Amino acid sequence: MIQDLRLQVRDLAVPIAQNLGISKIPDFADVIVLSSLFFSVVHNSLSPAVSGALFPVSYGKAGKRVRNNWDIHVASLVHALIIIFLAGRCLHLPSLDENRAFGWHEDAGFVIAIATGYFIWDTAESIIHFTEIGFVLHGVSCLLIYVLGFTPFVPYYGVRFLFWELSTVFLDLHWFLDKTGMTGSTLQLVNGIALIATFFSVRCVWGAKMSYDFFVTLNGVYDQVSTPYVVIYGGGNILLQVLNWFWFAKMMTALKKRFHNKSDGHKVVNGHGHVNGEAKI
């Protein structure tokens, strides 16, 4: 029965793929749907049950908004751990390296499908529980980029940009340390250093290098790529790089203020912002 449903989802995706010219998406339509449902279940069911049992005070007695943010960070952390592992298995696929613009491999398609399902959930959550336009723009940009990756188009870069999620692991841990009464602790300081180091290295430095390489690749196949792709991928790369530096600056300011206040003996008040995989401390 489950297999029949998966085949039906794939069949339903065929006319959409034909109309949009995204030829590879029917083969992974069921994975996209299952991924989106999985992260929705983690957010709405699994996290509340597990977090309530493990943290009856920090989670159980928190307000509705904080509990929702907690559940968002759980889903974000789960995605980061899964996608880093899967993307790592696609770094040395010859078919992608030989043709960085249009090369394809089924393993990369599976990883991109998982990420697409996550960004469907992420974008919807950013809109439903709106806190900042940057989170919505990030979700929409990533969703468009990964959906269009099924054309196929630049999956070589798609799997590599997913390593940005390495910093998300430390971001989510930082947030949980806040909510479990460990704000300003030595453990949070160590985690904060790891957060800054990974965010700067994988997003600001390595991410910029990947964006530069992408534009070099795009320039080489410019006459083979339609204008919407140039706008979405070119504009998306620039937007995401700007957001990375913007969030990095906010993190530096927040961390400096937090530990400076602690050293001065001031009370630190926990924040309530959520990030959907990004930086808001």
Image (cartoon, rainbow, N blue to C red):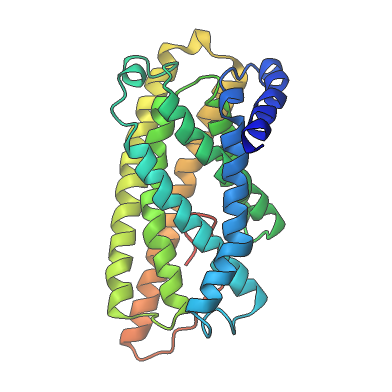
- Image x and y of residue 170, in percent: 37, 61
Q: Residue at x 45, y 42 (%)?
A: 241
Nearer-the-camera pick, 28 or 77: 28
- When asked about the image quadrant of residue 23, the answer is top right
Task: Name which residue lies at 61% across and 24% down.
Answer: 26
Q: Position of residue 128 (x, y in %)?
A: 71, 56
Considering depth in this image, is 118 or 253 the residue closer to the camera?
118
Residue 188 versus residue 252 in the image, above or below:
below
Is residue 7 toward the left or the right of residue 271 in the image?
right
Q: Nearer the viewer, residue 139 or 132?
A: 139
Pick the quarter of the image with the N terminus: top right
- The total of numbered circles placed on residues is 0
The answer to whether 111 is drawn above or below residue 164 in the figure is above
Q: Is residue 154 left or right of residue 196?
A: right
Residue 135 at x, y = what percent? 58, 52
Residue found at the far bottom of this picture:
265
Residue 103 in view, yes or no: yes
Residue at the location (45% across, 57% down)? 77
Q: Residue furthest front?
A: 1
Describe residue 159's horizontal placement relative to residue 5 as left or right: left
Task: Tell me the residue at 38%/40% (across/down).
Answer: 86
What residue occupies the far top of the structure in this picture? 223
Is residue 278 visible from the viewing direction of this image?
Answer: no
Q: Position of residue 167 (x, y in %)?
A: 37, 54
